[in-house]
Amino acid sequence: MILTYSLDRFVPAILAGTKKHTIRYDHHNRWRAGMPIQHWRGNPRNVKNNPYEFASGVCLGVQEIEILPGCSKMKHGLTVKVDNRFLTDEEILILAENDGLTVAEMRDWFTGGRYLYRGRIIHFTDLIY
């Protein structure tokens, strides 16, 4: 299946293996381990933005994730649950880095600073949280 990316910095991060997963809304639970992945910069359905496929791979695992901003107990002001387990501050930092984001970027990107986000982590490596 196709994964599209809107930020240029994700292309070299995926090619170098430093972006180890992506977090996506997957309402119909379509992603499964073993599925092929086509990584695209831009959406191939929007040709005026010059999309291109830059890599291919395999989904090595999928985990459920919930991201909630504004928890005063957590150092980063963010609560994250993966497969119903709360992550520590250190694990949240690692999760954000492995997704190619800072914790602040992750909070703003997925929650807008106000909303609960429910999605799935699509793993490019055998890393599991």
Image (spheres, rainbow, N blue to C red):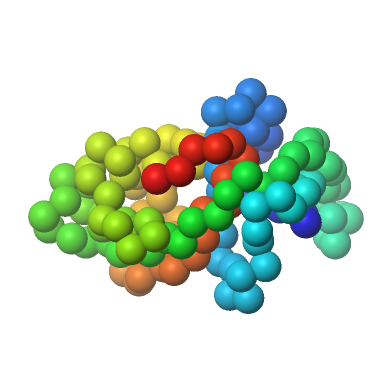
Residue at 75% across / 39% down in the picture?
A: 57
Asked if one can make out residue 111 in the rendered structure from this viewpoint, the answer is: no
From the viewer's side, name the closer residue of 56 and 72: 56
Left or right, 87 with respect to 71, comes to right
> Residue placed farthest to the bottom in the image?
28
Furthest residue toward right: 47
Q: Nearer the viewer, residue 73 or 56?
A: 56
33 lies above or below 91? below
Figure quadrant of residue 96: top left
Q: In this view, does 63 lie above or below 8?
A: below
Depth order, front residue of 48/120? 120
At 49% from the left and 56% from the top, the residue drawn is 63
Number of numbered discs present? 0
User: As drawn, is 28 to the left or to the right of 47?
Assistant: left
Q: Position of residue 24 (x, y in %)?
A: 56, 60
Q: Residue furthest left?
A: 73
Q: Position of residue 115 (x, y in %)?
A: 35, 71
Q: Where is residue 19 in the image (x, y as percent from the top left)?
A: 56, 35
The N terminus is located in which quarter? bottom right
Q: Residue at the location (33% across, 63% down)?
A: 84
Relative to residue 96, is residue 127 drawn left or right? right
Give x and y (percent) for residue 30: 67, 67
Residue 79 or 7: which is nearer the viewer? 79
> Does residue 56 show up?
yes
Give the position of the C terminus as an image quadrant: top left
Image quarter of residue 118: bottom left
